[in-house]
Image (tube, rainbow, N blue to C red):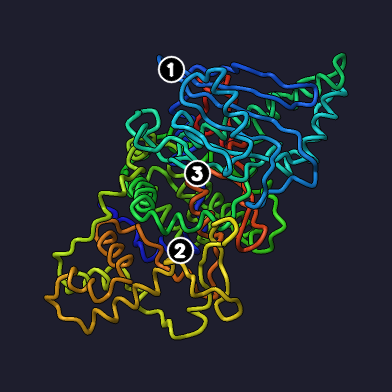
Amino acid sequence: MQVKLRDPNTIMKLSRLGSFHQSRLSFLRSFLDEFKEWEYKNDLFDLDENGFGTAIYSFKKKERVYSLICFANKINDKERSDRVIATKWDAAFTLHDGVPLKSDIDRLKNEVPKQEVGRLSYKELTLSRANKSIRVFNHVIDSLSKGKQPDLDLLNNVGYLYRTTAVYGSGKFGLADRFRIKNREEINGPFRLEMMLVYLVRQFTFDQVNHVAKFKNPKKAVKLDPSICRNLGIGNSTGLGMAPFIVNHPTLLNNWIMSREIALQKIREIKKVNFREIKIFKESLKNSLKNITSWNTDSVYQKKKINSLLNDVKKFLKFIDSDFNFETNYSFNKIYLWLEKNACEECIEYVVSMMLEPFDDIVKPLISKMSSDEDQYFTIPTDRKINDLRNIIEKRYSDILKINFKKKENNKNFWFISKNKEEPRYADRFEENGSELEQPLAIARDIKRLYEILLVSKNNLTIDKFLIENPDLRHVIRRAFIIENFPYSEIQDNTIGEDVIPIDMLRLKLSFFGALKFDPRSDKWLRICMFQGAPLPTDLKNIDQQWVYNS
């Protein structure tokens, strides 16, 4: 039996993309799988009694070494901010290529805490900063210093000791350009070094609280229980800066989505599923209920989604436990078709992620295909004809062509870059100034405009001649020729309409990172937790691949 890939006009809608969850394809999970055989070490831990100072952690395999250098700094409570305009943080980090010399550490001690204002070198691969969750951090130290473990309810409610506010890579602020390292086999997957940095930062947070508690009360202090450590992750505050990435990297987006869609397609085409595969799927699903019921948020929008998810997952579990026979042919295809008829989008995509769990032989080959050398698709085929371009748009953007952009509600918002921090922002064009500075992120509107001009253009006119008269449409002409071969490269929705929820774009990207427990603080920014439930570095060699559901 052959199963078609899911229709991009369905999957690439923002409401569906904003319902994606982590899976075996997620970058933090593939990172752990790749580095489980590497030698982990804490090479330096030079912190004072208050936990301020320098620490270094490393992964080593043969001659290759990656070293995380941590700088814990003293700041006033009033200086602590997760906003992009912040200039001081509780800790700053960089991932160094190799073993750092003393001169490297001295140089980085001056530059890394400055973050964007500092300057790194080709020896550094990623850069980050983080702030303490002060309430949790202080509570943990206070408890450990008194010889007892911290309050689990408080820890479960927050989920982390620190949260990062940015992770940079690929040439920013002097960091190594991607071309220097892109052929290394161990990082043949998107954002693998960024995942390494966050993972090692997580370990630093545990070591720091143990260290400070020991100094506070040397005779009574105990260490944070490893099982509690495993159930803590690293938080992250993410705003609109992440949203344009999805629009500006179409082939990369396609490869992420395409890998997931191919995996689902292949699983639906399996005629007979064995007992082990059924067991992993059902156990992962049942264990994951704890993740849903412990998903805390004050967002009314997200609470509604969580309740729908929980209700539909319970309904689905009842279906597969009582009414479904896994011995039937193409059982996962039948499960998927049932979901489409009976479950909300959030539940459909949740179970799709779960369906990937038992099938390493399908998933692993796809992980290496999730990167993209985007430069090779940048050139517009100027010898093609107008008729070609019109046909592509009619085939690939059929739903977008139905949108009437003359209606105020469909042209309500605009994207721009803030003057102070050069970060993306989103505003109402009818209530706020600045729409003349609009960024080219309204792809649906611009595609529709391009199409209307194509309708009155000669079929045999070549693209180069068309561009001479319409240079402002170059960006969407390029995208149209990209989507011809990359069907999941485009959000099939209006990113400037009044109904758009920008955090759907953030959540899409963060689900591929491997984030859990999305906590919207508005429609424009959210908090997440990463590596919650993950094995500690000393346990990686014995990793349980379903750790994300077994915590």
Identified by mark 2, the residue type is: Lys
Cα distance, mark 2 to mark 1? 49 Å
Using the image as rendered, state which of residue 317 and residue 258 is in the foreground: 258
How many numbered marks are there? 3
**Residue pictured at 45% horizontal, 54% vertical:** 245
Look at the picture and state if 20 lies above or below 144.
below
Mark positioned earlier in the residue sequence (2 or 3): 2
Q: Secondary structure at mark 3?
A: helix
Q: Residues within 10 Å of mark 1 (few under 14, many from 20)?
A: few
Identified by mark 1, the residue type is: Lys
Q: Which residue is mark 3?
A: 513
Mark positioned earlier in the residue sequence (2 or 1): 1
Image position of 345 (left or right of 372): right
**Residue pictured at 27% horizontal, 59% vertical:** 482
**Residue pictured at 76% horizontal, 45% vertical:** 79
Give the foreground label among 2 and 3.
Answer: 3
Q: Which residue is mark 2?
A: 341
Using the image as rendered, state which of residue 531 and residue 452 is in the foreground: 452
Give the x, y percent position of residue 533: 61, 34
Give the foreground label among 2 and 1.
Answer: 1
Q: Residues within 10 Å of mark 3 (few under 14, many from 20)?
A: many
Q: Which residue is mark 1?
A: 61
**Residue pictured at 72% horizontal, 43% vertical:** 158
